[in-house]
Image: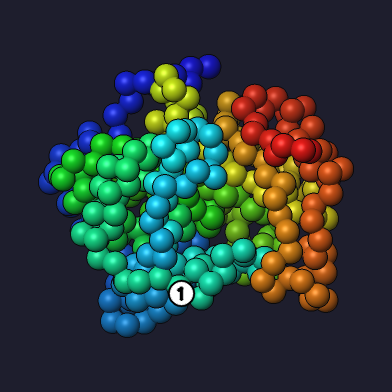
Amino acid sequence: MTTDAGTDTPNYLTLSSEERSARAATLREHYRDCDLCGWDCRVDRTAGETGACDLEDVALVAAAHPHHGEEPVLRGHGGSGTIFLANCNLACVFCQNHDISQGGRGREASPEEIAEMALDLQARGCHNVNFVSPTHVSPHLVEAVAVAADRGLEIPIVWNCGGYERPEIVDLLAGFVDVYMPDVKWVDDEAAALYSKAPNYWDRASTSLRRMHEQVGDLRTDDEGIATGGLLVRHLVMPNHVESSKRVLEFVANEISRDTYVNVMAQYRPAYKVPGSDRYAAIDRRVSREEYRAVVEYGRELGLTRMEVSPGY
């Protein structure tokens, strides 16, 4: 296994300026019959119609700053340059940032303005540009990367998504994304529909995971241990859903790669619509140490060699 790729060049710098602009224009056309995410709403966002994300053909940015709480391979010493997009294509009832993801807290930003944010984050010493909840506004973001590349951007792009993607759109992101970081939530479609309001979640997530790995491979790092490219999978262990978590890890180990970098997360806490709700009572508590350890131990039995685990568990 080779994880050191100190000479990796961001993918977008391997494309010509003309290629970058053409790809951005192709993606922008998808706003007219929107199929950018797993919902496949087919609304014309350029005509003021909205689908599951409740956005026209605009991007809302809630914040842009160095983030020192991401995975060590992303944050390093300079932080991960996060740009938070509002109106996620998922509607998780437990979302801790629901004011952004579902409440639309953010300001409208053009691709040129997002490009300037990316360049500013690079100037502040960030190791990457980390687009958080990017899927539903991918045309804006690809155009922003195209603009920023012409103006001197040269750090990796991280696609920090919820896993509810369409493989056809993942294909169009080839050459723009260096690190895919899907937060793969559910194998259980019934749970996905109840808690994340995402029908057919696992079909979308599993197919897209394969496509992401085919495109960028296992996670690679430079001489300082900072990610330069590849797939990083996040998975949040939920209370009373240990078997679903195990099946996520089974899929990653058996269908993707045992060298996949997997962050098995234990920080779930009831939030937003969950506390006190009879409908969501099964997840109205923190995950227990026993549940979390059962998932981690299973991952080790599967031969996953690069698991990040939560301290204290």
Residue 310: % across, % down: 70, 39
Front-most of residues 272 and 253: 272
The picture quadrant where one finds residue 63 is: bottom left
- Extreme right residue here? 290
Q: Which residue is painted at 62% across and 64% down in the image? A: 95
Residue 6: % across, % down: 36, 20
Amino acid type of the residue that numbered disc 1 sits on in the rendered structure: Gly
Residue 296: % across, % down: 76, 35
The residue that mark 1 highlights is: 104
What is the count of numbered marks?
Answer: 1
Front-most of residues 225 and 304: 225
Q: Residues within 10 Å of mark 1 (few under 14, many from 20)?
A: some
- Extreme left residue here? 18
Front-most of residues 208 and 73: 73
Residue 214: % across, % down: 45, 35
Horizontally, residue 153 falls left or right of residue 63, namely left
The picture quadrant where one finds residue 43 is: bottom left
Secondary structure beneath disc 1?
Answer: loop
Q: Is residue 305 above or below residue 151?
A: above
Residue 135 is at least partly visible in this image: no
